[in-house]
Image: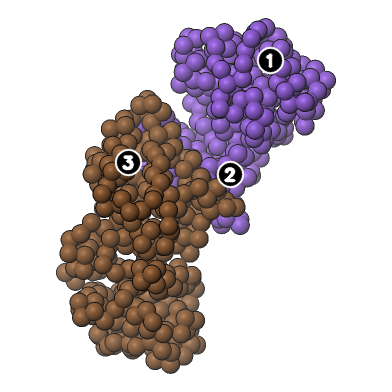
Chain colours: A purple, B brown
Amino acid sequence: MVRVGITMGDPAGVGPELIVRALHSDGGEGVTVYGDPFVLRAAALRLGLPKPEACAAAVVEITRLAGERPGVPSNAGAAAQVAYLEAAIAAIARRELDALCTAPIHKAQARRAGFAFPGHTEFLAERIGGGRDVAMMLTGPHLRVVPVTTHIGLSQVAKVLSPDRIARVCSLTIAGLHHDFGIERPRLAVAGLNPHAGEQGQFGDEETRLIAPAIAAVRKNPLLQRIAFEIAGPQVPDVVFRTAAAPPIGDGRYDAVVAMYHDQALIPLKLIDFDQAVNVTLGLPLPRTSPDHGVAYDLAGTGRARDTSFRAALALARRLTEMRRR
Amino acid sequence: MVRVGITMGDPAGVGPELIVRALHSDGGEGVTVYGDPFVLRAAALRLGLPKPEACAAAVVEITRLAGERPGVPSNAGAAAQVAYLEAAIAAIARRELDALCTAPIHKAQARRAGFAFPGHTEFLAERIGGGRDVAMMLTGPHLRVVPVTTHIGLSQVAKVLSPDRIARVCSLTIAGLHHDFGIERPRLAVAGLNPHAGEQGQFGDEETRLIAPAIAAVRKNPLLQRIAFEIAGPQVPDVVFRTAAAPPIGDGRYDAVVAMYHDQALIPLKLIDFDQAVNVTLGLPLPRTSPDHGVAYDLAGTGRARDTSFRAALALARRLTEMRRR
C-alpha cells in the first residue's frame, strides 16, 4: 500500500471539490487528507457525492472553518492552506507518508498568511528537501517538460541562466526519469534559448556559451554514471517539442525536454496535454505531485472544474512511489 | 483564373522537386515558374514524374545551370535564387501576376550573392510593398500565428517591442483576416510576453506598459473602422494558443494569435500543424505565400521531403487572391 498525503489547499478554491471527486472515483486506499472535514463535507453535499469518510481515506481535521464560501477567499482560509502543508510536513517527518499530492494554494493569500516561498516547490525543497536542488516537471500523456527558469519576466531569462543551473536541472530530470518513472535508458532533449537555437550565433550565443557546456557537464556527471542515458541539444525550440511528443502528435523521440523558460515548456505542454498534465517535483526525498492549475475561484462551487489533472496527480503519486520501491 | 508566380528558390534545395510534385498534383493552371527548366526536368526525372512542361504551367528560363547537384549548394545557384525573385518582381511590376508563392532560398547563400535582406519577407516589403509595413503570418489547419518580433535573440525581444509595432502587427492581422481570409468579424487574441502575462506585474510589466496600450490603439485605428473585429489581450501565453486552436485540440475561440516573439508563435504552430503550415506575408499589394521550411539540403534529391506545406502554399496563394476579388 502507498500512503499518500493530500493537502487540501485553499478552502475557497476548487481543491476541496476535486479531492472529494478524486476520492470517490479512486476509493482513497492509503490516503490521508490534511484539511477541513466540514469544508470537504460541504463540497460533497454540493456535488451530490458521499462524504469523504465514506471511502477508505482518512481526513485529519487541521481546521474547522465556519462560513467559508467557495470562490470567496478569507483570512482564515489563507492561514488554513499553510497549516495543511505544515501538518503534512510533520507527518512526513514522522515517516507516516510515502508520497504527497497537493491541492492548489493561492500564493498571494498564502503570503499574506506568512508563507515566505514563491510556491509549493520552493517550500518543499526547503522543508523536506533540506535545501537540496529541485526542479519542476510537468508531465502529460504526450509530453514531459522541465523548465530551468520559471516565474520570472522573459527579459530576465537570459541573465538568470547558467551552465551550472541548466546542468543541475538536466541531471535531476535524467535521475527522475530513471528512478521515479522507471525508464531504463532516459532520452533527454535540451531546448535552445533563441530562434533556430541561435542559428550559429546569429541570434544570440547562449546555446554555445551556456547550454552546450551544461550538456557536456551532464555527460560527465559521476552521479549519473550508472544510468545509460541520452542527452541531445541544444535543439531548435520550435522543432524539439514535436520531436519529443508522443505519437500521433509527435515522433516520441525523447522522454522529456528541458526548457529554458516557463512558456517554452508550458505553451507546448498545455496545448496538447491541457487538463491532463501533472506537476511533479524532482529531487525531493519522496514523490510529490500536484494538478497543473490554480485555485480557480471562478469555478469553485460550480461543479464545473475539471478533475482530470487532480485525479492524474493522485494516481501518479502512487505510481512514482511504486517505481521507487522497485 | 488566378495567375500565380512561383520562384524556384535554391536550385540545390528541395524547391525544384517540391515544385514538380505540386504542379503534377495541382495541374499548374495559371502558374508561371521563374527558375531553371533543366533543374526542374532533372528533378522530375528523379521522381519519375512528367516534365513540368507536361502540365498547364509555364516555366520561364531564368538560368540554365549545368552540373547542379541536389544538396550541394554552388555559387551559380546562390546567384540564381536571387535572379528568380528579381524576375518575379519584374513580372509583378508588369501586372502579369496576381499572387506569389516562393520556394525556399538559403539565406546565407543568398547574402553571398548580394541579397541584402534577412529573408523573402523584408525583400518583398521593400521591392513590391514600397517599404510598407508587413508582417509574417503562419497559418495551419488548426492555428494562425503572427509574431511581432522574429529572428532576434530572446534577450533582445523585450527591448525591441513597442506599442506602435505591436499595434501595427495587430492591425495588419485584422485586415488580413478580413480581406484575405474572408473572415467577416475577425477575432484576434494578443499574447502577453511574460509567464501568466506578468501576473499583475509580478514577472515583468510589458503587458501593461506595451501590450495593453497597443490593443487600445488598435481599437481606435480609423483604418479598421469598417471591420467589426474583436481583439482580446494581453492573454496568458500558455493558455491562449489552446484557446485559439481549432477543435479537437483547442477551443477555436480566435482566428489568429499575435505573439510577441518567434518561438512563442512557432512552438505551438509547429507542434500541431507541422508540415502543413504556410507562411503568408500580410500587408503586400498581392498575396504571397511560402512553405514553412527551408532548403533542407539533407533531404534534397532523396524524394523524402514532404510536399504538404508547399502544396498548401500554392493552393493558399490562389484562395487568398479569390478572397481579395470578392
The Cα atoms of the two marked residues, 2 and 1, are separated by: 30 Å
Mark 1 is on which residue type? Val
Please rate how many residues cluster around mark 1, counting C-alpha atoms within 10 Å: few if below 14, some from 14 to 19, many from 20.
many
Report x, y in % for residue B96.
Answer: 26, 81
Please rate how many residues cluster around mark 2, counting C-alpha atoms within 10 Å: few if below 14, some from 14 to 19, many from 20.
many
Q: Residue at x 72, y 29 (%)?
A: A22
The Cα atoms of the two marked residues, 1 and 3, are separated by: 42 Å
Asked if marks 2 and 3 fall on the same chain, the answer is no
Secondary structure under tag 3 reads helix
| Front-lying residue, A272 or B242 | B242
Mark 3 is on which residue type? Ile
Please rate how many residues cluster around mark 3, counting C-alpha atoms within 10 Å: few if below 14, some from 14 to 19, many from 20.
many
- Give the quarter of the image for residue B82: bottom left
Residue bearing the label numbered 2: A273
Report x, y in % for residue A90.
Answer: 63, 10
Mark 2 is on which residue type? Asp
